[in-house]
Image (cartoon, helix red, strand yellow):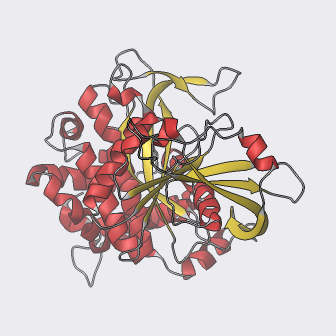
Amino acid sequence: MLPDAVPASLMTLLAAFSPLFTAPSFRTFTMLACGFLSQPGKRTVVGMLSGAGLSRRVPHDRAHWFFSRARWDADALGLAAALLVVSLLVPAGAPVDVAVDDTLFKRRGKKVWAASWFHDGSAAGPDKTGYGNNWVVLGIVVRLRFTSRPVAVPVMAKLVIKGTNSKSRLWLAGQMAGKLACALPGRAVRVVADSAYAGGELRDLPAGVSWTTRLRKDAALHALPPERTGRRGRPRVKGDRLPSLAQIAAGAQFTQVTVTRYGRTETVGAAVLTCLWYSVFGTRPVTVVIVRDKPGSAFGIALVTTDRDATAEQVIERYASRWSIEVAIEDAKQIFGAGQARNRTAAAVERTIPFEIACQATAVTWYATAGHDPADLHERRALAPWYTSKAEPATSDIAAKLRRVIIAARFKPSRPDQPTPQEISVLRLAWEDLEPLAA
């Protein structure tokens, strides 16, 4: 896929990554990105070349060299993807909402770098473990004009490596959030994650980063430290130990609030408490929001945030938006084919997933800024009339439309006023083959 055969609307976005590469490497990056996004089959390294239509024109070792030996940084690539998403999909000056989660990309073989046994919630059996590479994925949560739900656009990914600092998923998440905050000076970065992402590593969060997570039921909460007495000695850094979460909820005063979460607007009870979670956030005060779904029932979940300015409604809705990163990771695997490459060396393994995540972010950004058309939904429902309740384009629709645009741009007639019969036939077959894939 030569740069002059890339759709202009897509090339404008890919150009944002050009400062990260040398000229030859950026040419290879463009080829592989277009091949990855237009390949309906396996997204292996050579599959990307095949998807770009270059399997007979570009040697396959050039594609492998790009991941294993070329001079480019995976963290810088993810950061560039994040800045691209923020600049085009997040209102200027608005806080940047971020969701974090981890996932296992299953692999085989003892020579795969950093592969090991990790927790895998989708695994069969009671052990819930799988063998492969474990990745922590950071996505930027945005609101798109053609969807009613929040959408997480994955932009950065870090590999979990046992025996190093990177063995901690929380540490990796904090590193990515910190780099994003440094790249966006003056912008608030609001991170949301599940209860697994709470620990002592969060004591040194940058000033512009807030963290929202689910509070564990056995969390040791403390009151705010008392005023200084003026006596000699070290002042207290935390107040008295508070009762258990269940006891706090039993004596709390709940207020009815209206929230929109998981596609529904509902009224729930919320009790708010300001305290310290010293073992996790140190001396930084936090706000605890205890949520009760029905009056008179036991509380459902308790949320904790370092964002002191957020209301109870905002905290509840922000945590509910965390689910969008689960959807984004599933889309990365099932629709975009992330993780299908079979690289084994350290550099190649650590670069391939961030490359594929950046391509996914580019695809979503392309559709949101240039590819969306209200007629897409009508066309999709005409092709699949049994989807009577379909009211919004899905990720599969985004991937299918971009695939068609890339393939169409590849087949340019030698004379604009008179395309050859072979070009017409190839283009028609490309479109026909893609219609079942959009289903």
Between 26 and 120, which is closer to the camera in this rendering? 120
Between 14 and 117, which is closer to the camera in this rendering? 117
Residue 70 in the image: above or below residue 388: above
Residue at 15%, 40% in the rendered image: 70
Between 78 and 408, which is closer to the camera in this rendering? 78
Residue at 31%, 65% in the rendered image: 84
User: Horizontal placement of 262 versus 133: left or right?
Assistant: right
Spot the residue most to the top. 110
The quadrant in which the N terminus is found is bottom left
Total marks drawn? Answer: 0
Residue 377 image point, x, y percent: 60, 75
Residue 65 image point, x, y percent: 18, 36
Between 425 and 50, which is closer to the camera in this rendering? 50
Spot the residue most to the front. 231
Residue 260 in the image: above or below residue 350: below
Residue 250 in the image: above or below residue 371: above
Residue 42 appears in view? no
Residue 312 appears in view? yes
The quadrant in which the C terminus is found is bottom right
Residue 339 in the image: above or below residue 13: above
Spot the residue most to the right. 296
Q: Quadrant of residue 390?
A: bottom right
Residue 348 image point, x, y percent: 27, 33
Q: Quadrant of residue 344?
A: top left
Spot the residue most to the left. 23
Residue at 42%, 30% in the rendered image: 168
User: Horizontal placement of 427 versus 257: left or right?
Assistant: left
Residue 392 image point, x, y percent: 62, 72
